[in-house]
Amino acid sequence: MSTKLRLILGVLSCVFLLTSCPSGLKNGNPNSLKVGKKSTVTGLAYNNKKGGFQVNKSYKGPIVGPNLVFIEGGRVTLGGGEEDVMKRNDNRQRTVTIQSFYMDETEISNLHYLEYLDAIKRDSTLNAYTAALPDTTVWLDELAFNDPYVTHYFRHPGFRMYPVVGVTWKQANDYSAWRTAVVNKNVAFPKGKPRNRKNPIANMESGLILPEYRLPTEAEWEYAAKAMIGTQQEDENQENQRIYPWDGPSMRQPFGRTRGQMLANYKRGRGDYSGLAGRSNDGAMITAEVYSYPANDFGLYNMAGNVNEWTMDTYRPLTLDDANDLNPARRSEAQDPAKLYDKGNSLINDNAKVYKGGSWADGPYWLSPGTRRYLDKDASSSTIGFRCAMFAPGKPTKR
């Protein structure tokens, strides 16, 4: 075959490839990261200088917000795997599917919340600042001397990276809304300049606007805590469920150089919040720093113990029975109105919000991800904190 003939065939091959890929892509069909030069359904070019539909071609995948860990979704059996010692019958097992999402790798710390208060103090009214303050009196007890925690725990530098407590469900939601605005401004306009200078408009289509930070649903929280992803190579059907966010029934590390060390911060027994001084114990009489203890298989710290955590859900005993089996959640009294409950003998109403995880003042039973409790959305406690979650718009890519 002559050189001239080879050249002609090569040109024809290129023409065929270009015409067979209406998007103009040389390597196959368009996808969310590479959409091509023009629409595959209209043939119109993207980003035409004379006008037309503008597409951010520099999009390289979802931007992951600070402190977030990607939680790959999947099928899971939620609910209690242990004896229902409280006899509430409110955590019966059910198989559901959870969409992928992001979750904070740590609980929100005192330092994080002080940053929020500082921003409100500078930018908002005195009433807004006062409304955002955590209730430090949650430490008071007439039959104990916990008074130093009232004045020191939240603001002293020695407790900077300890989980914030005394925060209501409503305050946790307000914090999430503020964080969303601050992070999105920084993502789209780092150092005050637009990240995409060719198209400085920051909208949803640009990929520079993150979904909102929010409280996780109860199902998301439980799924992330169990972290069954760590067992799936050996047990794809997940026949062997986890009691805690780690393998085995023990509260101590079962093997390795750290064998015998505590895996969580909890109350070991009546009057025993930490163990003996100088011995292997959980290292904390009250809370511990948010990066304490080993992370679970998703990379999340303190999904058992340290502090309980607020979830998005309104409490009802049979939420898993009622809710959809895809991304179950209860945000209202739908199919289970509050009027069905005895107001005189029941605390169940639309203000009752679910919290999970167990705390420094709880026994091992409450550290199991399937257990659930509730509290009024305007109430707070020295044993309840929170972390945020976020919807995942596509799988993250390395940047």
Image (spheres, helix red, strand yellow):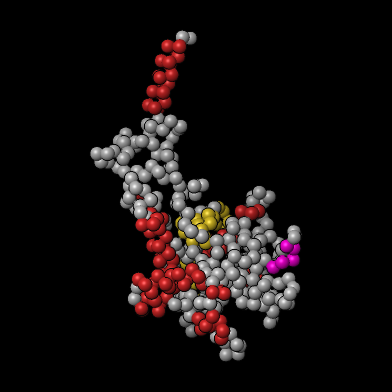
Q: Nearer the viewer, residue 336 or 57?
A: 57
Instruction: From the viewer's side, name the closer residue of 121 and 387.
Output: 121
Image position of 353 (left or right of 256): left
Q: How many marks?
A: 0
Of residues 361 and 280, the one drawn nearer to the viewer in this rendering: 280
Query: Which residue is at 27% across, 41% downward?
Result: 52
Examine the image and state in which quarter residue 382 appears. Answer: bottom right
In this rendering, position of residue 38 left or right of residue 89: left
Name the foreground residue: 28 vs 83.
Answer: 28
Query: Residue 76: x percent and y percent?
Result: 58, 56
Q: What's the residue at 74%, 63% (across, down)?
A: 259
Residue at 35 percent across and 52 percent down: it is 194
Answer with left or right where residue 399 lies relative to residue 295.
left
Q: Is residue 136 magenta?
A: no
Say which residue appears at 67% left-offset and 77% top-offset: 273
Residue extending farthest left: 50
Q: Position of residue 369 (x, y in %)?
A: 60, 65
* 380 over 214 or under it: above or below: below
Q: Residue furthest top?
A: 2
The answer to whether residue 243 of the structure is visible from this angle is yes
Q: Is residue 345 visible?
A: no
Q: Position of residue 349 (x, y in %)?
A: 46, 76
Characterize the magenta stretch by its predominant secondary structure.
loop
Please provide percent x and percent y for residue 355.
Answer: 53, 71
User: Which of the 4 image quarters holds residue 297?
Assistant: bottom right
Q: Which residues are magenta?
A: 258-262
Q: Is residue 372 left or right of residue 277?
A: left
